[in-house]
Image (spheres, rainbow, N blue to C red):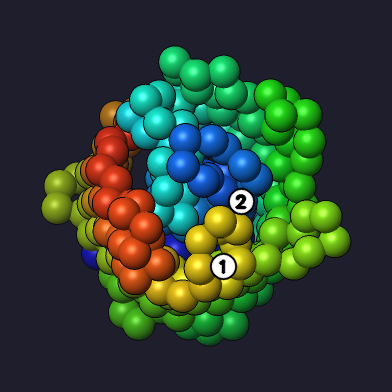
Amino acid sequence: MKIKYNARNVGAAALGCAMIAGTVCAGEETVSPSIASLTNMQEAAIPSTDTDWAFSFSAGWSSKYVTEGLDCLPGSGIWEVAPSISWKNLTFSAWYAGGDSANYDELDLVLGYAWNLGKWTVNPWYEHQFYFTQDYNVANPALTVSYAVTDWMAVGAETQVKVEHQDFEAYYSAFVRLEWSPLENVTVVPMVRYGYNGGYNVDYDDGSNCIDWSLGVTWRFAEHYTLSGSVNYSQAATVLRHRDAGDEFWVGFRLGMEF
C-alpha cells in the first residue's frame, strides 16, 4: 500500500479538477468561478516518475459538475480534457471542460510547485480560470499542505482564495486520503474532505459548508494507459443544509495517458 501523494499529484491539484472543479453556484445559475476541488485529486493524471520530465493527458466525463457542495450545472454533466507537463517538482497543467447538455465552456491554467520536506509536502499553486460562456476570468491562488502518516495514508489542509472585483474570498478544507492496491495494476483511493466557507460561496453564509466523500479506482491496463472511475457524495453541512442545498451524488470516468 504505497501513497503516491507526491509533488506531481499534490502540487497540481487543479489538474485533478477533471471531475470536481470549479464554479461557485447560486440556485440554478453559475455566478462566479472557484478553484478546483481537492476531492477528486486522486484522479489526477500526472504520473509518478524517476525522470525529471513527465507528460500526461486525460479525457473524462462526470454525471454532475459539483464543487464546494453545489451542483453548478443542474441537469447536465461535464466532459473534460486535461494535458500536463512536469519538470521535477514544478507542474503546468490545463483543464478544458464543457457541459454535455448545457451551454458552458471553461479553461483552467494551473502552475504548481511542491516542496517535499520529509513526510511533509508543501504546495503553493496558482490557477487562472477563463469562462468563455460568461466572458470573464478569475485568479485563484491556493496552498495545500499534506503529511504522510503512513505509506498508505495522508492527511492535509488547504486554503483557496478567489480574487474577484478586488475582493478576497476564501475556502478552507481538511482531508484524509488513503491508497492501496488490492490487485496488481489496480489502485483504490478513498478520500474524505471537510470544507468551511469563508466567503467563497458568495450567496451562502460563512461556516461549515460540506463534507465530501469519494472512492476512486484506477486500473493500469497498459504501461502508459489507465482507466479510472469514481463514486462521489457531497454531504451538506450547516451552511448548505440551512438553505436546503447540497447533498449531491455523482459518478465519473477517465482515460489517462502518461509518458
Q: How far, Cα to Cα, is label 2 from label 1?
A: 9 Å
Q: Quadrant of the C terminus?
A: top right
Q: Position of residue 176 (x, y in %)?
A: 34, 71
| Image quadrant in which you'd find residue 194 | bottom left
Tag on residue 171? 1
Q: Amino acid at mark 2?
A: Ser
Question: Which residue is tagged 2?
Answer: 34
In the rendered image, is residue 249 in sight?
A: yes
Q: Nearer the viewer, residue 154 or 215?
A: 215
Task: State yes or no: discs 2 and 1 in contact (Cβ < 8 Å).
Answer: yes
Picture coordinates of residue 200, whole percent (x, y): 60, 62
Q: Is any part of residue 114 visible from this angle?
A: no
Residue at the image point whose x is 28% and y is 38% from the top: 250
| Residue 209, position as x, y percentages in the image | 41, 66
Q: Amino acid at mark 1?
A: Tyr
Residue at 25% over, 43% down: 249
Please state which of residues 200 and 109 is positioned toward the viewer in this rendering.
200
Tell me the residue at 46%/55% (across/down). 68
Residue visible at 71% across and 51% down in the picture: 127
Front-lying residue, 225 or 25: 25
Badge 1: residue crowd in 10 Å (few <14, some 14–19, many ≥20): many
Task: Report helix, strand or loop for mark 2.
Answer: loop
Quarter of the image that includes the N terminus = bottom left
Above or below for 172 versus 71 = below
Reading the chain from its start, which is encountered first: label 2 or label 1? 2
Q: Is residue 176 above or below residue 16?
A: below
